[in-house]
Amino acid sequence: MDILALLGTATGIALFSGLRLYTTILAIGLALRFGSFHLPQRLAGLSVLADWRVLAIAAACFVVEFLADKIPLVDTVWDGIHTFIRPIGAAVLGYTVIGNYDPWIQVAIVLACGGIGFTAHSAKAGTRVILNQSPEPISNIGASLVEDLFAVGGSLIALTHPLLMLGVVVVFLLVFAFLARKIVHLLIGRSRRPRGDMNAPS
């Protein structure tokens, strides 16, 4: 049960780090700094997020991301820059959660958290590309605000209800796999249509 709880916390934090890395770090760090949540011994490694230096850097990056993510096309560029930053951040946070376990468990969790972070980032970036097809900025701003709320609430739930969060992560991965397959088939179908039209007799 203990390892499952750690897995739920680690993968949950990784999921929301892929969505909003700096928001996740800031939410957890502030909760710890001001005593809203007291870490159990098994999560002692996360106490580093309450360090004022970590909070200062996370806060500065959060402000930049909060603004950039509300502007169509700018958010796409920002997501492109973070294609590797978010998964790496998710992997580092996963290691911070699981740091006292055997090396093979550490490696497995780091790889899992990096993969989950990348998956969440891909889902976010892909959704934004679709939303940016609309000329109005309201849908983009709304989606960004929802992501902010999800990152704050989800990262804290990962600390307080790890088994619930583990279930959320599993469901997310299943839904992503299903939708990704549909999207790939759709893109392949579209890529084949022009060829058929070009070969069709005039």
Image: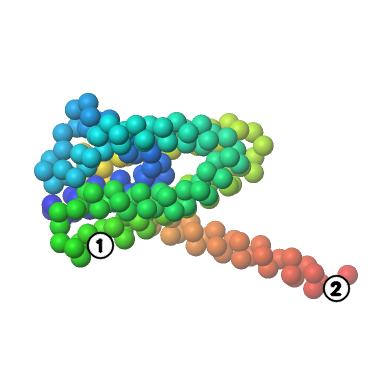
Q: What crowding class fits label 2: few (fewer than 14 Cα within 10 Å), some (14-19), or many (20 or more)?
A: few
Instruction: Identify the residue shown where x is 51% and y is 37%.
Output: 69
Residue extending furthest toward the top:
34
Q: Is residue 188 above or below residue 64?
A: below
Instruction: Identify the residue shown where x is 29% and y is 48%.
Output: 93
* Residue 124 visible from this viewpoint: yes
Q: Label 2: which residue?
A: 201
Relative image position of residue 110 (x, y in whole percent): 29, 58
| Left or right: residue 99 compared with residue 68 | left
| Left or right: residue 27 compared with residue 179 | left
Q: Is residue 80 above or below residue 195?
A: above
Helix, strand or loop at disc 1?
Answer: helix
Q: Label 1: which residue?
A: 107
Relative image position of residue 43 (x, y in whole percent): 17, 44
Q: Is residue 151 above or below residue 36?
A: below
| Left or right: residue 152 compared with residue 97 | right
Helix, strand or loop at disc 2?
Answer: loop
Q: Which is closer to the viewer, label 1 or label 2?
A: 1
Relative image position of residue 109 (x, y in whole percent): 26, 58
Instruction: Identify the residue shown where x is 55% and y is 41%.
Output: 75
Quadrant for the C terminus in the image: bottom right
Q: What crowding class fits label 1: few (fewer than 14 Cα within 10 Å), some (14-19), or many (20 or more)?
A: some
Q: Quadrant of residue 178?
A: bottom left
* Residue 150 visible from this viewpoint: no
Q: Quadrant of residue 132?
A: top right
Amino acid residing under circle 1: Val
Asked whether the residues under the numbered discs 1 and 2 touch, taking CB atoms below 8 Å apart as contact, a structural biologist would say: no
Q: CA distance from mark 1 to mark 2?
A: 58 Å
Amino acid residing under circle 2: Pro
